[in-house]
Image (spheres, rainbow, N blue to C red):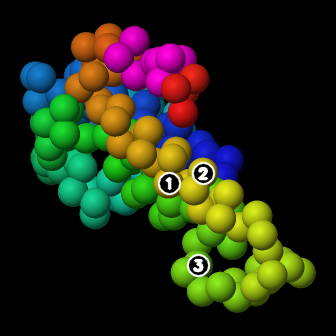
């Protein structure tokens, strides 16, 4: 799975709201200018994030958007799942059926389990990275400990 701009820009949008919403709701126009992302594109993303319960909106002259949850409880995995609408890195990994019908090896593919396991591993990692952790500058806590990999 190649993450699209939806996930990358959606993560930047959520981070911008987390940083700038202490004084109240943040207009998307402000986010658009700060992040250099089209307002139309942000409007598409914000709808999906609202439906998922990650963001809430306020109308009116002082309206805008805010996080609907604490930054510590929003993971990058939540954002990617919401915006990509899948957790599979390949089409064949999206289906539970043995005969997925996606490629010419459907039902006889020995490598399909690799893509299913890779999808699970990627989201397990993304679920460990919270918006709160990123804001606190805790990127180091998300670094891979090479000794753990060597032990396996």
Residue carrying label 1: 120
Task: Residue 37 in the image: state x and y as whole percent.
Answer: 53, 34
Seen in the image, is 97 located left or right of residue 63? right
Of 93 and 23, the residue lying toward us: 93
Would you say residue 152 is visible in this rendering? Answer: yes
Label 2: state its secondary structure: helix
Instruction: State how far apart marks 1 and 3 are (Cα).
Output: 13 Å
The answer to which of marks 1 and 3 sits earlier in the sequence is 3
Q: Magenta residues, as a range?
A: 140-148
- How far across and down, in percent of the image, does residue 114 sit? 67, 57
Q: Residue at label 3?
A: 95
Q: Residue at x 43, y 40 (%)?
A: 126
The part of the image, by quadrant, that contains residue 106 is bottom right
Q: Residue furthest right?
A: 104
- How far apart are the two marked residues, 2 and 3, measured between alpha carbons? 14 Å
Image-quadrant location for residue 21:
top left
**51 in relation to 92, above or below:** above
- In terms of depth relative to the viewer, which is nearer, 43 or 14? 14
Establish if 1 lies above or below 148. below
Residue 141 colored in magenta in the image? yes
- Which residue occupies the foreground of this view, 14 or 151? 151
Q: Do the CB atoms of the residues marked 1 and 3 lie less than 8 Å apart? A: no
Q: Is residue 28 visible?
A: no
Q: Which mark is residue 15?
A: none
């Amino acid at each position: 799975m190649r993450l699209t701009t939806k996930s990358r820009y959606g993560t930047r949008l959520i981070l911008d709201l987390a940083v700038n919403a202490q004084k109240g709701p943040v207009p998307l126009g402000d986010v658009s200018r700060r992040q250099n992302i089209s307002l139309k594109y942000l409007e598409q993303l914000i709808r999906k994030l609202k439906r998922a319960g990650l963001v809430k909106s306020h109308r009116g002259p002082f309206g805008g958007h805010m996080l609907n949850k604490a930054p510590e409880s929003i993971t990058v995995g939540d954002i990617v799942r919401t915006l990509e609408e899948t957790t599979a890195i390949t089409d064949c990994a999206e289906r539970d059926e043995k005969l997925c019908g996606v490629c010419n090896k459907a039902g006889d593919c020995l490598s399909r389990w690799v893509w299913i396991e890779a999808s699970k591993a990627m989201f397990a990692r993304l679920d460990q990275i919270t918006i709160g952790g990123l804001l606190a500058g805790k990127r180091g806590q998300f670094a891979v400990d090479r000794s753990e990999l060597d032990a396996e």
